[in-house]
Amino acid sequence: MNWPLFSIFFLLFSCSRGHTLGTKAHIFGKKAKHIVWIQVDGLDDEHIALVKFARESAVELTPLEQMSCTGSMWDYNLFNLRPEPIESFMSQILGSQKIKGDCSDLDRSAVWNYFERSGYKVGVLEGRGDRNQSLLKYDSCNPEKPFLEDSYFWSQSMGAKNSKRFHFQEKMEFESPGKFFDKSCQEGQCFVSLKSNVTKIWPAMTKKFSKTFFVIRQSEYREMLLDKDILGARKSLEETMAMISFFLPKALKGDISLVVTSGSPQKFEFPESGKEWASFEDNGSNVLYKRPGLLAKAWSAGPGAEHFCGTYEASDILRRFIWTPDKNVLYFSF
């Protein structure tokens, strides 16, 4: 046997093997220039059935099922076993378990602040929903340095009369960070969908800036569940799935990092049989509500997706965003 030739062949064969994560091709240790984080109040993994069972074929995978990695997060903090959604997400954003839902929470930097120091531009888009669950409640805590000071913040709400406005059919302005309110929103109702705003704002932002950290917050889904508006909740979840579908191909190609997390996952029992499903959707019948779950969920795809696998504290999300496998250090200096 020609051992030198065999050795070369073996080396080439070994190096040609691709790496996978969740049976999908994946490059480990890569850093993305564009990061998208979708936050959904009340979402639990079983809720995928709302969308999955409404399709012609139940074997068709939903976008969440196509993500590369799934994780579970202990959602409690030091003060509440079942925190409100805004408290759950602040624990994820700040990397802290000391969350009370007031200004005392802001004793440390948000996850996107670390990315800003490395040249990333930050954008936050909040959909329709309870304003008590909005990040805006924290912005007035420190007048000298507002919580969202260096971020582009778009809200699907009316805002004050003198507020800056935006509309998805108009050119998006990126002259300086600020708060912008949707022109289509009047008295609690918005005539432009969250997805329409996402598919206009994100492409414009990534065209303008070479590195971005983009957060999408969806709170109306949980509100509809609690109101027993199951049909409305399904439509809301379908819109979230459509947003994930918009980003997922880019993530699986390795162009962006995509992370979806839940907070205060609302537990309930689905109907026992298909015959009960119609009344379940029409008027919320045949459903038994439970307390919010103790484990929130995380789904990920694209560069860094491997960091979000497993079971961990919700406050550990921050570290997983900025961790690198090189010598077990973080991307950025604290």
Image (cartoon, rainbow, N blue to C red):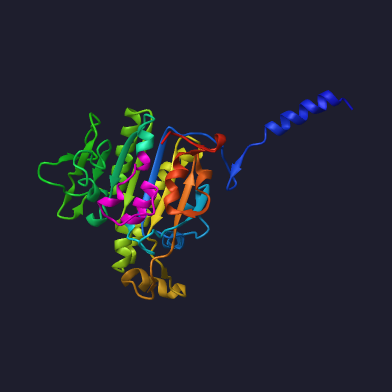
| Residue 28: percent from left, percent from top | 56, 37
Tell me if residue 96 is in the magenta stretch. Answer: yes
Q: Which residues are magenta?
A: 86-112
**Position above or below: 201 against 218:** above
| Residue 333: percent from left, percent from top | 43, 33
Asked whether the viewer can see residue 247, the reply is: yes
Please indicate whether residue 6 sits to the left or right of residue 155 in the image. Answer: right
Tell me if residue 70 is in the magenta stretch. Answer: no
Picture quarter containing residue 220? bottom left
**Residue for point 80% across, 27% down:** 7
For the image, the number of numbered tags is: 0
Asked whether the viewer can see residue 303, the reply is: no
**Position above or below: 34 against 291:** above
| Residue 70: percent from left, percent from top | 51, 52
Foreground: 250 or 121?
121
**Residue for point 43% across, 60% down:** 44
Please indicate whether residue 227 sits to the left or right of residue 314 in the image. Answer: left
Foreground: 206 or 136?
136
| Quadrant of the rendering where the N terminus is positioned | top right
**Residue for point 37% across, 29% down:** 119
